[in-house]
Image: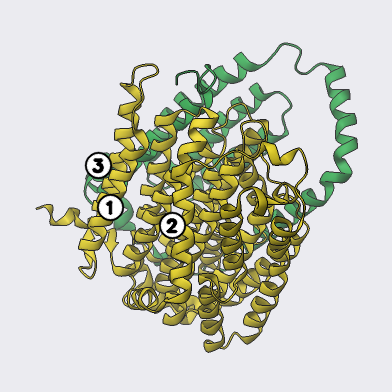
Chain colours: A yellow, B green
């Protein structure tokens, strides 16, 4: 009887932890310390254990959630994202006096939504999961109530996000109109049957779904909200949303476009080609001009979305494996980088201008070293995991015949190294401003540990990537 | 057929014109009232589509509950001197100042909207196979008991996920809207 619940156990654990956080906050006396963050860790560990147990089992729940290895791999990435985010959030919540129970509850609900989005095989459920994760993240973006910028960024994100959700829903409606079903494998077979007469309605349905996904992965030209939202949110939240949302959205993107809508690939591959090229180029070029590290990483996140789109358009099994590996590497790297931004922030000052990082090497040598690792990995330098990830994406693109797109990718990576190196040069070779040196705070232990662990994961994945790459490659067969 | 087509055009026109007028109003109260009119037209369209339950829900939930609430909020927030002549004049000068800044994105947005509408019309005009939809399937989901059955069998999981969605929305609303400054309770 309980067999039908197996596939949703990981997200049930996380949801339960979210409710536990809410209830714990409600029953907390004023001033009573209560480990609300660790409740989330317990839930995530539960999710990790169940994910490991579900591996290779191909469990299905209610016919709409499938815990195939692809979904489980993304779930595992999301668990890593969750653990690191909880660790780097703790000092932020403390420092800013954020409502503790609500913060962790929203973060955990959003994680549950992401996991559901990665494993759902029904368009309706994918939409609901998208809404769960988005609503929680809109609120987290604006959770600093005293920050005007936070309110502005959250509101922009909310309005544009609501708009894009409407597009997505409209696309689902057209798919339902065409096939009479929202279930992905049924949509896939019926689309394949109709593929010979690829009419305007199919194009419209695919286009609308594409807009919805492109917004969530912040592909150009649907990226306008990204820099504002990323800058406005507390850095810990930015780290969480830039990695978690990307992982979940790309998982669903791959599932919908490379399985259910694969028969129409002739109709959408050129559009995604253009999106990928524009995203890589604009993300990189505009990123060069930024003076705030947060905005720079926001544009870098846009550009990384472009590399992932490049893998998506390639469409073969190598590319799907490359997407999974890339998502993992990007998640760990970006969370580490935002962890550092987060611990360097103080109550009154964001300390996020590039010049604030001048002389970090002399004041916080370990942090400077870690930041160097993360930035080099984002830029794709050889000993770091980012290099391997990009290598596989470009290899998949060339393998699929998208040589020009791969060339654009390599060129933009080279340009992007410029802005990552600028920060590194600033950290090591510039003298610190006399007054900024004193304002940089001490590093909290938990967040520091999370940062070091991220750096170690990146080094490990960069030097010995074979095992994880094999897992990623093995988990893409039989996606539904 | 004739009367049904006539009703379709009447309801369709009411819906479209009312929706357009919603965004053309300066006074938000009128906007809300026009939105109710637009929803009424929509529910008429649902009746024509053999979906009486959806039509009734549209009236009860949207026009009845949500928009009345909306109206209350608008009226409570609407300061009496909101729309005076000098305010409008001031807004106009601000608009003129920012017009150049905004005209680029505005043009881009307008262009996208036009492209979208043209595409939609083009696509809908070219549908020839209207018989693709199964009329029995439509009958099966239009009665209340059929909707209930489908909701708790086929869409059971989606229904449960919606409850989490609502919890998230409520928690979020409380976090963003409560009066005490965050962090008082530490």
Q: In terms of secondary structure, where does tag 2 sit? A: helix
Q: Earlier in the sequence, mark 1 or mark 2?
A: 1
Residue that label 3 marks: B148
How many C-alpha atoms fall within 10 Å of the one at disc 2: few (<14), some, or many (≥20)? some
Q: Is residue A17 left or right of residue B92?
A: left
Tell me how far mark 1 sits from mark 2, CA to CA.
Answer: 20 Å
Q: x, y percentage for residue A96?
A: 55, 30
Q: Is residue B55 visible?
A: no
Q: x, y percentage for residue A243?
A: 50, 56
Where is the C terminus of chain A found, in terms of image quarters?
A: bottom left
Residue that label 1 marks: A47
Q: Is residue B149 left or right of residue B91?
A: left
Quarter of the image for residue A273 reads bottom right
| The one of B3 and A226 positioned closer to us in this rendering | A226
**Foreground disc of the pair 2, 3:** 2
- What is the number of the mark on residue A453? 2
Q: Chain of mark 2?
A: A
């Amino acid at each position: 009887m309980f067999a039908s619940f197996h596939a949703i156990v990981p997200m049930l654990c996380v949801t339960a932890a979210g409710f536990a956080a809410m209830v714990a906050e409600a029953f907390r006396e004023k001033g009573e310390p209560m480990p609300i963050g660790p409740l989330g860790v317990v839930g995530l560990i539960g999710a990790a254990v169940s994910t490991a147990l579900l591996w290779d089992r191909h469990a299905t729940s209610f016919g709409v959630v499938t815990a195939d290895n692809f979904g489980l791999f993304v779930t595992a990435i999301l668990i890593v994202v969750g653990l690191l985010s909880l660790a780097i959030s703790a000092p932020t919540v403390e420092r800013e006096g954020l409502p503790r129970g609500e913060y962790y509850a929203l973060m955990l609900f959003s994680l549950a939504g992401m996991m559901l989005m990665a494993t759902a095989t029904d368009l309706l459920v994918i939409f609901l999961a998208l809404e769960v994760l988005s609503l929680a993240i809109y609120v987290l973006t604006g959770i600093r109530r005293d920050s005007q910028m936070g309110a502005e960024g959250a509101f922009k994100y909310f309005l544009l996000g609501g708009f894009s959700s409407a597009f997505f829903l409209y696309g689902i409606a057209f798919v339902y109109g065409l096939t009479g079903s929202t279930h992905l494998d049924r949509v896939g077979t019926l689309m394949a049957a109709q593929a010979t007469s690829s009419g305007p309605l199919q194009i419209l349905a695919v286009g609308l779904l594409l807009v919805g996904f492109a917004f969530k992965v912040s592909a150009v030209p649907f990226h306008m909200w990204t820099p504002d939202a990323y800058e406005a949110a507390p850095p810990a939240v930015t780290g969480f949303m830039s990695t978690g949302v990307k992982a979940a959205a790309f998982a669903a993107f791959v599932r919908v476009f490379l399985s259910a809508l694969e028969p129409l690939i002739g109709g959408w591959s050129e559009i995604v080609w253009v999106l990928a090229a524009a995203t890589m180029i604009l993300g990189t070029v505009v990123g060069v001009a930024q003076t705030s590290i947060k905005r720079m990483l926001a544009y870098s996140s846009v550009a990384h979305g472009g590399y992932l789109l490049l893998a998506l358009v390639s469409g073969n099994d190598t590319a799907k494996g490359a997407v999974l590996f890339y998502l993992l590497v990007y998640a760990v790297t970006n969370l580490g980088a935002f962890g550092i931004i987060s611990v360097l922030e103080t109550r009154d000052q964001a300390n996020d201008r590039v010049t604030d990082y001048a002389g970090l090497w002399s004041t916080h040598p370990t942090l400077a070293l870690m930041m160097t690792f993360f930035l080099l990995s984002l830029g794709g330098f050889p000993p770091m995991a980012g290099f391997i990830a990009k290598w596989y994406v470009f290899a998949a693109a060339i393998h699929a015949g998208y040589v020009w797109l791969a060339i654009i990718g390599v060129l933009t990576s080279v340009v992007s190294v410029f802005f990552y190196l600028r920060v590194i040069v600033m950290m090591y070779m510039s003298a610190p401003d006399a007054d900024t040196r004193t304002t940089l705070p001490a590093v909290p232990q938990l967040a520091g540990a999370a940062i070091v662990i991220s750096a170690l994961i990146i080094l490990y994945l960069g030097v010995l990537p074979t095992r994880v790459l094999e897992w990623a490659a093995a988990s893409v067969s039989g996606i539904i | 057929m004739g009367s049904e087509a006539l009703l379709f055009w009447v309801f369709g026109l009411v819906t479209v014109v009312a929706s357009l007028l919603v965004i053309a109003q300066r006074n938000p109260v009128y906007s809300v009232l026009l939105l109710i009119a637009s929803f009424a037209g929509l529910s008429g369209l649902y009746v024509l589509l053999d979906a009486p339950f959806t039509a009734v829900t549209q009236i009860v939930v949207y026009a009845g509950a949500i928009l009345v609430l909306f109206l209350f909020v608008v009226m409570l927030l609407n300061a009496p001197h909101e729309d005076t002549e000098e305010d409008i004049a001031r807004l106009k000068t601000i608009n003129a100042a920012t017009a150049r800044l905004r005209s680029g994105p505005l043009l881009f947005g307008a262009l996208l909207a036009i492209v979208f509408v043209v595409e939609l019309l083009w696509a809908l005009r070219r549908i020839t196979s209207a018989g693709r939809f199964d009329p029995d399937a439509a009958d099966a989901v239009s009665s209340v008991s059929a909707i209930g059955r489908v909701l708790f069998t086929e869409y059971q999981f989606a229904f449960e996920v919606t409850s989490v969605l609502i919890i998230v929305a409520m928690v979020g609303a409380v976090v963003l809207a409560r009066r005490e400054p965050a962090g008082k309770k530490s």
